[in-house]
Image (spheres, rainbow, N blue to C red):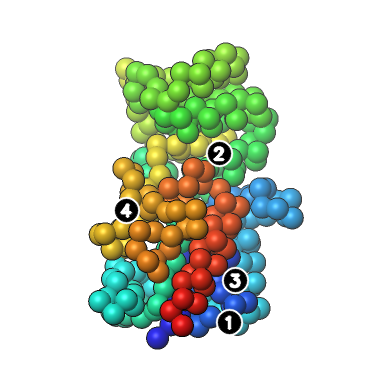
Amino acid sequence: MLDLIIVGGSAAATTAGIYAARRGLNFKIITKDFGGEMATSGEIGNWPGITQIDGMELASQFKNHLNSYGVIPEEGVEVEKIIKQEDGLFCVVAHKDNDLCDYLAKTVIVATGVHPRELNVEGEKEFRGKGVSYCTVCDGPLFAGKTTAVIGGGNSALEAGLMLADISTKVYIINKNDQFKGDSILLDKLVSKKNVEIVYNAKTTKIAGKQFVDSLKYEKDGEHEITVDGIFIHIGMIPNSNIVPVEVQKNGVGEIIVGKNCETNIPGLYAAGDVTDVSFNQIVIAAGQGCVALLSAVQYLNKLK
């Protein structure tokens, strides 16, 4: 019997784990892979106190911080579902090493994050972190003075294009549709940038390079190839929220709806980070939500005593 199960292995889960250890809770952190999307990032320059750090290295520091409190995240655990039992306890059903395992706890924090919607084209997986990125805020500054491409047709693609236009020498915007779905004011600003070239009705077909990205191919009245140093894919994010009970309220894109204290509509079940309906997906926001979720869980546990 545990006080708490934290599902996840990145900023929100780590922060919740640190605070849980400091509160003396009997808890576990379980995750498939520690580090989450953060670990797949290139250089991270927006974590306070550290000017620049590699995503894998920051994940290692997170783990070391947990270890300093005697907390060892249990990795290789793939959660299948979370069930709230009639007795009020939560059963977390999971698989580890192909074996079924259950965890029983009084509270649960879901900090499973999101995963980017992929293009599913040749070279995409191979060059992820080697010129292919799904976060312009995180990785855009690495491409100052270089040629970049943004793939997408919504607000996130427009915002990425605007950011890159200020730091890259040339920015291509590859949109498979004949118009953008985003805000017109963003498009107007983007069009006014002299170093931005928008390509409509273009379907990306291949990402190529040697050790790092050096070109992108797309189809539009035939095949075209452009030389680029970095490619930013913004075609949507998918929240890892399929493990929560069906009664949990979600928004139209599957994000878990939480209140100001990171509580879901099920008492004792909390969510933090990018898996929630928080307005912005940023590492510092996820960490803050991890803290809020944990302190809320503590209040809940205190009421049970």
**Front tag of 2 and 4:** 4
Q: Residues within 10 Å of mark 2 (few under 14, many from 20)?
A: many
Res. 98 visible in picture: no
* 269 sits left or right of 66 in the view: left
Mark 1: secondary structure: loop
Q: Is residue 223 left or right of residue 290?
A: left
Say which label, 2 or 4, has the lower sequence index: 2
**Residue shown at 34% from the left, 46% from the top:** 251
Q: What residue is rendered at 49% in x and 27% in y?
A: 158
Q: Please name the residue that numbered disc 3 is placed on.
A: 19
Which mark is on residue 136?
Answer: 2
Near mark 1 (Cα within 10 A), the count class, few <14, some 14-19 or many ≥20, is few
Q: Which residue is mark 1?
A: 24
Give the spatial CA distance, label 2 vs label 1. 38 Å
Q: Which residue is mark 4?
A: 249
Evaluate if marks 4 and 3 touch, with contact meaning CB atoms under 8 Å apart: no
> Seen in the image, is 63 located left or right of residue 178?
right
Image height check: is 271 above or below 237? below
* Chain-order first, disc 4 or disc 3: 3
Q: Amino acid at mark 4?
A: Gln
In this orientation, which residue lies closer to the viewer: 175 or 219?
175
Of the numbered discs 3 and 2, the one sitting upstream in the chain is 3
Tag 1: amino acid: Gly
Q: Position of residue 89 (x, y in %)?
A: 34, 77
C-alpha gap between disc 3 and disc 2: 30 Å
